[in-house]
Image: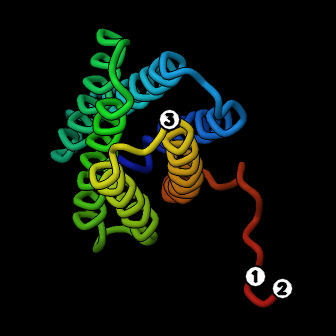
Amino acid sequence: MNDMISKSWKVLALRGVISILFGVLAALWPGLTLMWLVVLFAAWALVSGFGYMSAAVNNRKTHSDWWMLLLMGLIGLGAGIIAILNPGLTTVFLVLLIGAMALANGVVEIAMAIRLRKSIQGEGLMIVSGIVSVLFGAFLFFFPGAGALTMVWLISIYAIVTGVLLLLLAWRAKKWTGHEENFPPAVPHGT
């Protein structure tokens, strides 16, 4: 499975960049209407879902755990499609939808990291990303009545933190493939 993730480092990096971009845009425009938030969320969920599904399809013949990536992709696609088909969603329902996606993705990421713990180094980044997703999703379920502005800030922080963690994971996964020459050289400890 670590080979599958190392081959999918570009998808991880793309998800990280998109998550950071989404988070920054949401933070810069906190007065977004709910409609624009629905559109931004739908685009983010769809791209994330397609990214995971692409990685699953590319690895289905060589890795038995490809279905986990497919599951994460279907979760993202489902959340995005629901947001597009029902643009009049209430703020509370959108919060619960985002929370469900974050919670489900977090659980799957943690499960993947546990399966990888003996075969790779650095699975801790995937565990941390999964924990952040689970905590964010749980928070949204316990406090669904938060105002739209608060929701925008929470989503922004979540997307940026998740994006940074995914970029770090992609960087590490690229190293697993032996193509680390494109990355900055490691700085020795103590300098």
| Disc 1 target residue | 188
The image quadrant that residue 60 belongs to is top left
Decide: is 7 above or below 119. Answer: above
Res 1 seen here: no
Res 50 seen here: yes
- Seen from the viewer's position, the closer of residues 103 and 3 is 103
- Under circle 1, the secondary element is loop
| Disc 3 target residue | 148
Q: Amino acid at mark 1?
A: Pro
Q: Residue at x 73, y 86 (%)?
A: 189
| Disc 2 target residue | 191
Question: Quick check: 154 left or right of 79?
Answer: right
- Under circle 2, the secondary element is loop
Other residues around mark 1 within 10 Å, as few (<14) / some (14–19) / many (≥20): few
Quarter of the image that includes the C terminus: bottom right
Other residues around mark 2 within 10 Å, as few (<14) / some (14–19) / many (≥20): few
- Under circle 3, the secondary element is helix
Disc nearest the viewer among 1 and 3: 3
Residue 51, given in percent of the width and then of the height, sits at 41, 29
- Seen from the viewer's position, the closer of residues 38 and 171 is 38
Q: Residue at x 24, y 46 (%)?
A: 104
Query: Distance between the Cα atoms at labels 1 and 3?
Result: 45 Å
Residue 86, given in percent of the width and then of the height, sits at 30, 12
Furthest-top residue in this view: 85
Residue 65, given in percent of the width and then of the height, sits at 19, 47
Q: Amino acid at mark 3?
A: Ala
Q: Earlier in the sequence, mark 1 or mark 3?
A: 3
Query: Distance between the Cα atoms at labels 1 and 2?
Result: 6 Å
Q: Residue at x 49, y 58 (%)?
A: 176
Q: Pointers 1 and 2 in contact (CB under 8 A)?
A: yes
Q: Amino acid at mark 2?
A: Thr
Question: Quick check: 34 left or right of 164?
Answer: left
